[in-house]
Amino acid sequence: MAGIPSCFSSDNDDSAAVTRSGQSVVTSVYRTKIKDQWRFITVTWCRDLLLHVFTISMAPETESECSFKIEFKPWRFWKKQGSKVFHLNGKELCVFWDLREAKFSNAIEPESEYYVAVVYNGEIVLNLGNMKKEAIRKTGCWPSSTEPVLVTRKEHLFGRTTFVTRFKFQDKGSFNEIFIDCRNRDTPEMEIQINGTKVILVKNLQWKFRGNQTIVLNKSRIEVYWDVHDWLFGRGLRHGLFIFRPTESSAAENSAIAAAYGAPEFSVLLYAWKME
C-alpha cells in the first residue's frame, strides 16, 4: 500500500491554527480565470458553539491579498446580505453575498438557499450556492466563459471515536455522507462508510495506521488514503488525515491536466481531530 501523497503529508501551520481555535473548519480552493490569468480564490467557513465565520480571499502573485470576513453572531444583528469592493489591476473586484435564508443542516458550510458571487470586469468569475440565477440578477453580470474549478477541499472535524461530514466529490454533484469510526475492542479497528455503506474496514490498525484503498462510488473510482499514526501513538489533541481523490482518468491524463492549468487534481482532505 502507498502512504499519504507527499504533497499533503504536512500542514503544520494550518493545523496549529485549528488547534488553538477549536473550531470546525472547511476550506475550498477554486481556480478561476481573471484577466487571462489563473487565480486561486479560497473560501473558508468556520463554526463553533456560538457563531459561524465566513472568509473569502484571493492571493495574486504580485498584488496584495484581497480578503474580507463576516461573522454570524446570534446575539446581535449581522449583515446576511451585502457586497464589498476591492481593486485589482486598476479595476473593481466585487464580492456579493446573500445568506439570509441559508440552510446549514448542522453542517459547517451552508448546503442551500444562498449565493456568494465574485465579479471582475463585468463577469461573474465565481458563483457559489444554489441561488445562481439570483446572483446573476443582483449583480447584473453573466458568468465568465471559463468556469471555475474546485481544486481542493479541506475540512477539520472534532470527535472522540466517530466523525461525520457531508461533501461533494464533484462541484456539481450531490452531497455524500462520510462516516469514520475508530474503535478499540481487542485490537484497534477503523471503518469508513459512505452514504451508509461500509467501503473500508481496517483491522489491526496498530500495524496498518497508514495505507490506501480504491473504492467505487456511483461508478467512479476514488482513491482513499489514511494516516492515523498520531491517533494511536500521539498525546493530547491529535488528528488523523484522510484524503479522498477521484481517479476517473489515468494518472498520466491527470498530470497533463494539472500541468496545463497550473493546479493539482482535485482532492478532499479531512483532518479528524481526536479528543479524549
Image (cartoon, rainbow, N blue to C red):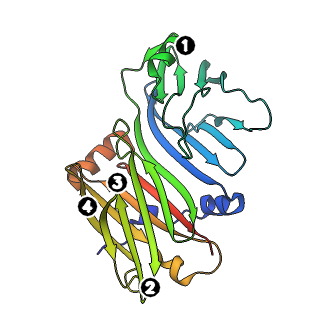
Q: CA distance from mark 3 to mark 4?
A: 13 Å
Of the residues shown, which amino acid type is indicated by label 3? Asn
Q: Residue at x 54, y 14 (%)?
A: 139
**Residue 101 relative to residue 224: left or right:** right
Q: Secondary structure at mark 3?
A: loop
Q: Are marks 1 and 4 in contact (CB under 8 Å)?
A: no
Q: CA distance from mark 1 to mark 2?
A: 56 Å
| Mark positioned earlier in the residue sequence (3 or 1) | 1
Of the residues shown, which amino acid type is indicated by label 1? Lys
The crowd level at tag 1 (other Cα within 10 Å; few <14, some 14-19, many 20+) is few
Callout in the foreground (3, 1)? 3
| Mark positioned earlier in the residue sequence (2 or 4) | 2
Q: Find disc 4 in the rendering and name its residue.
A: 215
Q: Find disc 2 in the rendering and name its residue.
A: 185
Residue 32 image position (x, y, % from top left): 44, 32
The crowd level at tag 2 (other Cα within 10 Å; few <14, some 14-19, many 20+) is few
Q: Residue at x 52, y 54 (%)?
A: 155
**Residue 198 relative to residue 58: left or right:** left
Q: Find disc 3 in the rendering and name its residue.
A: 195
Callout in the foreground (2, 4)? 2
Q: Secondary structure at mark 1?
A: helix
Q: Find disc 1 in the rendering and name its residue.
A: 138
Q: Residue at x 50, y 11 (%)?
A: 137
| Mark positioned earlier in the residue sequence (1 or 4) | 1
Q: Which of the 4 quarters of the picture holds residue 263? A: top left
Residue 269 image position (x, y, % from top left): 45, 57
In the rendered view, tell whether residue 226 sits above or below residue 90. below
Q: Secondary structure at mark 2?
A: loop
**Residue 19 relative to residue 106: left or right:** right
Q: CA distance from mark 2 to mark 4?
A: 26 Å
The crowd level at tag 3 (other Cα within 10 Å; few <14, some 14-19, many 20+) is few
